[in-house]
Image (cartoon, helix red, strand yellow):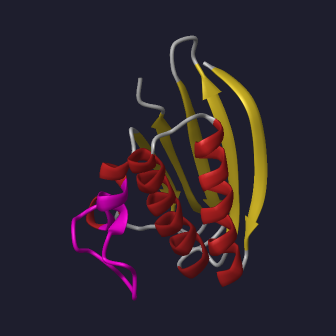
Amino acid sequence: MLTARTERIAVRGPHDIVNVRQVVRGWCLAVGMGLVDLTKMVTAASEIARNTLEYGGGGALTIEELRDGVRQGVRLIFEDQGPGIPDIDRAMTDGYTSGTGMGLGLGGTKRLVDQFDIASTPGQGTRVAITKWKAR
């Protein structure tokens, strides 16, 4: 898999969540994603960005345009150095929220994208990578 281009943006305040949505939308349009898939990716990005800010104390997003010879897509990697998630299985449960989230949660976010990976170490932070491929 080839990473065609990348961009890194900060997630430090509420205004950055708006920026994440706008930037992700632009990247999805650039690879030719349709409206439904674009909306799913922007929704997922918004939820993870909000989690990065609210629960991780802020962090960063790395955006990658992916190509594998047949497919083209966008991968988003959110990273923070917050308290981490002590129970990922519980956090992935539908309806689970430890705060005032949208209620979509990590489980709902996972269903919006084609690939979802999460790694978290209590006391060290969390990394969430989501990928959406352009429909053929």
Assess whether residue 108 is covered by the magenta stretch.
yes
Q: Which residue is pictured at 62% across the width and 29% down the height?
A: 66
> What residue is rendered at 65% in x and 83% in y?
14
Pinpoint residue 58: horizontal percent, then vertical percent. Answer: 67, 74
Q: Give how far across and how far down residue 100 sits, in percent.
A: 39, 88
101 to 93, vertically: above or below: below
- Outermost residue on the left side: it is 94
Asked if one can make out residue 80 in the rendered structure from this viewpoint, the answer is: no
Residue depicted at x 27% and y 66%: 90
Q: Is residue 79 magenta?
A: no
Using residue 38 as the reference point, say whether residue 11 is left or right of it: right
Magenta range: 91-109
Left or right: where 38 falls relative to 28: left
Asked whether residue 73 appears in the rendered view, the answer is yes
Q: Main secondary structure of the magenta part?
A: loop
At 57% from the left and 67% from the top, the residue drawn is 49
User: Based on the displayed image, in which of its 4 quarters is residue 30 positioned?
Assistant: top right
Give the image location of residue 12, x and y in percent: 73, 76
* Rendered-image quadrant of the N terminus: top right
